[in-house]
Amino acid sequence: MIAFEDHFHLSKTELGKILSIALSKGGDFAEVYAEHRIYSFINMEEDIIKETAESISLGLGIRVLAGEMTGYGYTTDLSFEKITNAALSAASIASSGMGSNAFRFKKVKPKANVYAVSDPLHLTELKKKVDLVKEAYLACQKTDPKIKKVKVLYQDQIQHVSIVNSEGLMAEDARPQAKLVCYAIAEKKNRKEFGYSGGGGRVGLEYFNQVLTPQQTGQEAAEEALKLLEAVEAPAGEMPVVLAPGHSGVLVHEAVGHLLEADFNRKKTSIFWDKMRKRVGAPLVTIYDDPTIPSFRGSYNIDDEGTVPQKTLLIDKGIVTSYLQDRLSARLMNLPLTGHGRRQDYTCTPIPRMSNTYVERGQDDPEEILKSVRRGIYTEKLEGGQVEDSGKFTFTISSGHLIEQGRLTAPIKQVTLIGTNIDILQKIDMIGHDLTFGLQTGTCSKEGQEVPVADGCPTIKISLMTVGGQA
Amino acid sequence: MKEKVQLDELSSLAENLVAFAKAAGADEVEVTIADGSEFSVDLRLGKIESLVEAGSRHLGIKVIKDMKTTYATSSDLNDGTLKRLIQNAVKRAAYGSHDEYAGLPASMPEKIDISPLKLFDPEIKELDAARKIRLAFETERIALEDKRITNSHGASFVTNGVKTILANSKGFLGSYDQTFCSLSVGLQAGGTDDKVEDYWFSTERFFKDLEPPETIAKKAVERTVRQLNPRKIQTQAVPVIFEPTMTAWLLGFLFSCISGVAIYQKVSFLTDRLGRRIGNEKITVIDDGLMPNKLGSRPFDSEGVPCQKTTVVEKGVLSSYLCNTYAARKLKLGSTGNADGTGVSPNNFYLIPGSVSPQDIISSTKKGFILIRTIGHGLNPVTGDISRGAFGLWVEDGEIAYPVSEVTIAGNLEKILNQVEMVGNDLEFRTAVCGPTIKIGELTVAGE
């Protein structure tokens, strides 16, 4: 309640009125989502602090559900008149039903506070943040004279979210998020290569002293660019692929996570819609999505519908066990909520999304996994991927190695891999005991909405996958 | 451009904030306001899924003090908030570095006539909800009549209206209104375990120009079912035909490599290549912000620099980078009217069409691959390297033989532009970045 009053100047009585207007034409459910975000941004390149910026995003969205239909209106003007207009826009979806005008709000209590912050960045003076940026920049630059260009971006934000709905839910959250990334270009003769590193999450200033120093980020970016100067073309064709622990988690995010989002399964467009409790992968594959990992980029105390989230088992020893749910799909599918209803901002309706997705550790020794491959590739860092409902997915390696006779040899240049998810899940034949999470800098895009996510995995061997190099 | 006339509320706000920032200590100021409205309906299998109607305002401020640049943006247009943001921005300049290239454009246009551009359709605001819903409904209904279509991602009808206002401390005050409307449908064919999917759309500034539901539905069906029962192919290097949507994708990558920002930052392989050959004679690429009616047109860019027509590549020779004021100063060139916030964006950016029909291009190909869709990432402007998941059609003896899936294509933009053998006559301005069908001599298609 405090947040609604403080940030949005809306009293309980006014919120009740807005919900009544939203349900004035009928409908099963109405909700008010208000958001106030403050961002701080710093960009350093060409050896100077080129830009600093401060941004404020303030807005309110009203949603009405009527059966499978959603009505939505939003406004950046929080006058009662404009909010009423937005409520009327949302109301227009319904044409029957009871409506309601008596609401008793009960506040949602999160299970735990996943924002491990002792020194909040949004309250930190700009100078200290500028120092972090400079530290990363200089560390990157001085790694090697072949580093010809460096760019460092820093961003922090605090997002205040307040939600009430016609079922009496009242929830609020104040989510911190920070990100420091470094880009490096190394040059040798006529060759230029690009390296990248970064970190962050739901963290405070102390993270950059204790967990991941700007110096480390700068050096890692430089080292990747330098390594790629020596990279050879990846081979093309089908071959064994070993995923390095950590950043290769992108593969799971693309190949499995998206297609277990409930909306695609409710609409039967996902290849998984008829596979609940069926085997889709090798028995050694177990996959979770967990929004409750402290300080992780994809974590939250409540989702964007006010649901307290839970660690969700998606694939249990190769068998599909759960979808990622939001309120709409859970109600229509008659399944329990999992707390994965997320939205980019107040202009968007919530949809089922991943948070922190990972493959559970296995039994194998990572060394033995490598030794089992005569000729293949080792993917160290993935720059992103995409999946279609058919299960076809790609991901692009930005850094990796050839595997020859069970050993890592030459680094390889950027290359794209393609596969079909169920096929690949069945071809996973070894999983290491070395679960690691990737860089805390990931953003996932779905239906034009971007949300912060993280992913992870142990060393994984896929017995055969199509690699597109240059023949 | 400024005459003493009655200003609307938002133009006055912009001017007042410029004056406030000057008084607060800024040397130069630029204020941009976007006042937008949005309507969208999504429906699926004949039922409405969502209906969105909304309005929003955003304000952007750029402050330059002692040759240091700071920015602020806000969707909260409360007077107190905006003044505090401006004061913070002026103070923040102290943490920036002196940048000799900082600053607003040196000179501002006297007057820009926006009427010939035809960016605004008054009819769009008047369309009633039932009619908009019916358009989406009809599009999907027609598509689903085809029995090969087994599921639908749904159909959407979307309209947007935006008023853009720009004021700066050099006395510039300009504004323009624009509209967009779009009708689209996404489809699936095949069974659960052998699904194929695609979509089609029409986007226009004027409602009367929008393609009818039948045209969009039929095209979406055709694009989807042609992928049914795909085969895998052996890894090989073959001629590759890019459909217009794929040429547009390639040009989008070219844009990111000739953007003045990428050039001065030296993150593009086309740095220091002005006046040099980057493709063969068949390649002429234009950026034109002044084409009436077109999606990428605008009277002036985000800094108030008038838009223009720029030849970017002329018969294979790189003739211009596309710059905002900052990149232009860095490169000792002129702004081309492509500023967009802190970066640059294309206006109407297209490849000049040739005279061959797409059918003749296919007929000319003994063995080859028609690229119809790509997925994933895999574009590297530093090297020009391309690596993507791909879907396509296999060509044998001048005819389409069967669909192909689960392959990747790999190549290099400069090599591709030098290997263009044929350019089609089928250019349509369906998107701001666009091109006709083209045929490339040889690319690696990786399969089994």
Image (cartoon, coloured by chain):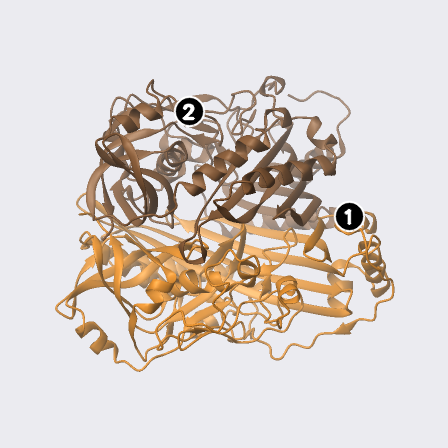
Chain colours: A orange, B brown
Residue at the front extreme, as displayed: B147
Q: Residue at x 85, y 58 (%)?
A: A17
Q: Residue at x 34, y 63 (%)?
A: A423
Q: Which residue is mark 1?
A: A92
Along the viewing direction, whichever of A111 and A309 lies nearer the viewer: A309
Q: Secondary structure at mark 1?
A: loop
Side (left or right) of B317 relative to B331: left
- Where is B428 relative to B161, above or below? above
- Where is B103 relative to A305, above or below? above
Q: Looking at the picture, how far across and down is residue A155, in whole percent?
A: 51, 57
Q: CA distance from mark 1 to mark 2?
A: 41 Å
Residue at the left extreme, as displayed: A405
Along the viewing direction, whichever of A304 and B151 lies nearer the viewer: B151
How crowded is the residue under tag 2: few (<14 C-alpha within 10 Å), some, or many (20+)?
A: some
Q: Looking at the picture, how far across and down is residue B303, in whole percent?
A: 54, 32
Q: Secondary structure at mark 2?
A: loop
Q: Residue at x 57, y 59 (%)?
A: A263
**Chain of the residue where label 2 is placed in the rendered structure:** B
Q: Which residue is mark 2?
A: B427
- Can residue A469 be seen here? The reply is yes
